[in-house]
Image (spheres, grey):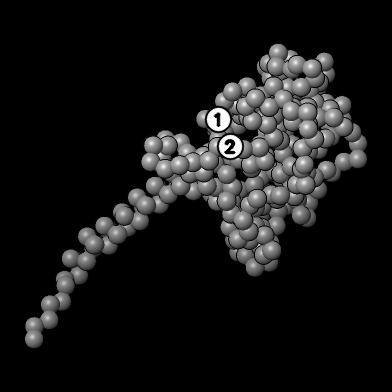
Amino acid sequence: MDVVHPHAHSTWPGAAQALLTTVIIAIFVVTFVVQAFQIPSPSMENTLLVGDYLLVDKLRYGGGFFDEIMPYHKVQRGDIVVFHYPIDPTQHFVKRVIGVPGDRLRLINRTVYVNGAALDEPYVHYISSQRDAFRDNFPQTNLPVPGLEGRWWLQMRKLVEDGQLIVPEGYYFVMGDNRDDSQDSRYWGFVPRENIVGRPLLIYWSVKSNNDDMTSTPTPGDRLLHLAYAVTHVVQVTRWNRTLRLVY
């Protein structure tokens, strides 16, 4: 019986083809299916923490040619979404949708009212006992405050009727679950539908952040050192109770 042994030089085209296929699949998945993000700020505590690493479902709300070949979900009130920050689209933000097109919104003493009814928000987190006239009673059209984007303040004044902000068609009003420490739609305005990337699906890894042990804001150098430490001390820094947790 004759046995044919492949020559060494004949194996590399197959290996190259397999590698190329893997790269193409990976690019397709990252472009159209899921994308990894890291939570850099405490604005969504305690739902999402600094140091959570997310896989974001980019098919949830459709977009591109997928609109023609598969069904997708509408963005709904209560959804957590990742989106391009309207003021600087190069940045990605994650917030919770509070108002959808046509909704009439207002906050009274921290309670959100949508179309006249108080919104049930068991996910909301507060870090301060101090009340703020603008942050906790919204909209306030006569109170320009630090951090309030000027163009949004002018636009907001035109969209308020009977003390309620009307969400226009094609736009969404979003807020962080950590209501006392969230730069959100209250300060810079609506999120256009086309800016929404998807929704967080899974916390695939969660690592203790600098904020777990530090009270000051870390510098870029601090963050780099922290990442290097995390990679070399995975067992010690991993929040095991949050790793592989679905996001709701």
Residue ranking furthest to the left: 1
Quick check: 195 above or below 6?
above
Pinpoint residue 49: horizontal percent, then vertical percent. Answer: 70, 50
Q: Residue type at mark 1: give it.
A: Arg
For disc 1, the neighbor class at 10 Å (few under 14, some 14 to 19, many from 20) is some
Mark 2 surroundings within 10 Å by alpha-carbon count, few (fewer than 14), some (14 through 19), many (20 or more): many
Of 6 and 102, the residue lying toward us:
102
The reply to whether residue 221 is visible in this rendering is no
User: Of the residues shown, which amino acid type is indicated by label 2?
Assistant: Val
Q: Are marks 2 and 1 in contact (CB under 8 Å)?
A: yes
Answer with left or right where residue 175 lies relative to residue 232.
Answer: right
Q: Name the spot of residue 25 as percent of width and height, x first.
A: 37, 52
**Residue that label 1 marks:** 193
Residue displayed at 62% across by 27% down: 101
- Which residue is rendered at x = 78% and y = 55% of the image? 213
Q: Which mark is residue 75?
A: 2
Secondary structure beneath label 1: helix
Q: Earlier in the sequence, mark 2 or mark 1?
A: 2
Taking the spot 72% from the left edge, 33% from the top edge, the residue there is 183
Residue lying furthest bottom in this view? 1
Can residue 174 be seen by looking at this rendering? yes
User: In which quadrant is the N terminus drawn?
Assistant: bottom left
Instruction: Classify mark 2: helix, strand or loop.
Output: loop
Nearer-the-camera pick, 139 or 210:
139
The Cα–Cα distance between marks 2 and 1, rounded to whole angstroms, is 9 Å
Residue at 74% x, 17% y is: 160
Tell which tag, 2 or 1, sits nearer the viewer: 2
- In the image, residue 189 sits, relative to residue 68, either above or below, namely above
